[in-house]
Image (cartoon, rainbow, N blue to C red):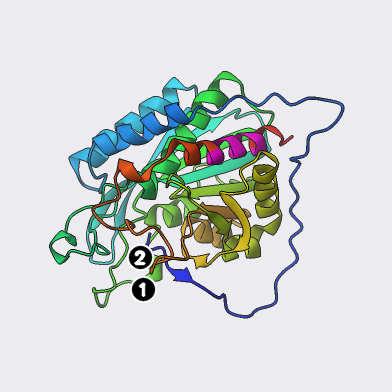
Amino acid sequence: MRKILILFLPIFQLLACTHTTKSEQTSEKTISVPVFSPDSAYLYVKKQVDFGARVPNTIAHDACAGYLVSKLKRFGAEVIEQKADLKAFDGTILKSVNIIGSFNLKSETRILLLSHWDSRPWADNDPKPENRKKPVMAANDGASGVGVLLEMARLIGKNQPEVGVDIIFLDSEDYGQPESAGGGQSSEDSWCLGTQYWAQHPHVPGYQARFGILLDMVGAPGATFCREQASDYYASAVVNAVWGQAKSLGFGQYFKDEKGGAITDDHIYVNKITGIPTIDIIHYDPNSGSGFGTYWHTTHDIMDNVDKNTLNAVGTTLMHVLYNEK
């Protein structure tokens, strides 16, 4: 996706958010939360990167898709490969596949977990002009979120929570129009193509979930996740629950209770099209020009930018959020 960082949202009347989450432990029952393994999550990230850049219409993309499908099936998920030919801003037809793994299908109460798995085809933010037509390895920008969700899927398969869980690896997110390109599809809607397709054609007709959580760039050493403004607008109660859980677990240095930017990311289309209150956990770096890491959309988005401690903070927090839902 083109992660457009907007420091201020337009002024509008904020709608009252009526969504509530049940994430508090009760005195009547101690909730057993499986222990998240950052080592395992890290290896899942590395395995994706080892395939090479997962750009649609490439061998690496196809190979990684097969790997993700096989892993979810091995963990006990019911898997759907939602294939679609999606037209990019430049007319390229992208052979895309959203990979959906579902657990506890009998439960009508569903939680939606999301991350994109494709790589950007051009390192158009690279400081070296000669690198700007090279693909991005996308270790942090894509693979980190998928790695966290794969580890969660492994644990869910062994000890399912009371609610149903749908994990979606979204495709063709990062094939958005570069700033240097002109004409064609509007810049904003040229991103997140797989998400737009899924939101308009959900894997289950009329699909709904209690809430959704999107992971994007969740592996950087010392990453900070501020309250993304669109998330606060659409799903402030979910933000409160996640950030509150992180603080209670001792991860407050990662999950900052501070306002971040407003990001055009997959959660925007989930909120607008499906109405599912969905938040974005995304690294925010106020010291960089882009608002993201200095390696963002460069050839340097490699495994050096993935840290087990950060993966653990995100994964452990989400496991506690998930297993406290009823």
Q: Residues within 10 Å of mark 2 (few under 14, many from 20)?
A: many
Would residue 285 be found to the left or right of residue 111 on screen? left
Quadrant that contains the C terminus: top right
Q: Residue at x 19, y 39 (%)?
A: 59
- Considering every residue shown, the one lying at the far left of the view is 130
Would residue 114 be found to the left or right of residue 119 on screen? right
Circles 1, 2 touching at the beta carbon (< 8 Å):
yes
Quadrant that contains the N terminus: bottom left
Position in image of residue 50 (x %, y %): 25, 35
Mark 1 highlights which residue? 186
Position in image of residue 305 (x %, y %): 36, 46
- Magenta range: 313-321
Task: Give the distance between the C-alpha atoms of the residues marked 1 and 2, in whole angstroms.
Answer: 6 Å
Q: Residue at x 70, y 41 (%)?
A: 248
Q: Residues within 10 Å of mark 1 (few under 14, many from 20)?
A: few
Q: Is residue 77 magenta?
A: no
Would residue 106 be found to the left or right of residue 266 on screen? right
Q: Amino acid at mark 2?
A: Ser
- Relative height, residue 69 to residue 248 (above, below): above
Which corner quadrant of the image does residue 209 belong to?
Answer: top right
User: Considering the numbered disc 2 on the image, is that residue within a helix, a strand or a loop?
Assistant: helix
- Relative height, residue 19 to residue 319 (above, below): below
Q: Residue at x 49, y 22 (%)?
A: 76
- Relative height, residue 220 to residue 324 (above, below): below
- Relative height, residue 221 to residue 315 (above, below): below
- Tell which of 94 and 155 is nearer to you: 155
Which corner quadrant of the image does residue 27 belong to?
Answer: top right
Mark 2 highlights which residue? 190
Position in image of residue 126 (x %, y %): 24, 62
Q: Main secondary structure of the magenta part?
A: helix
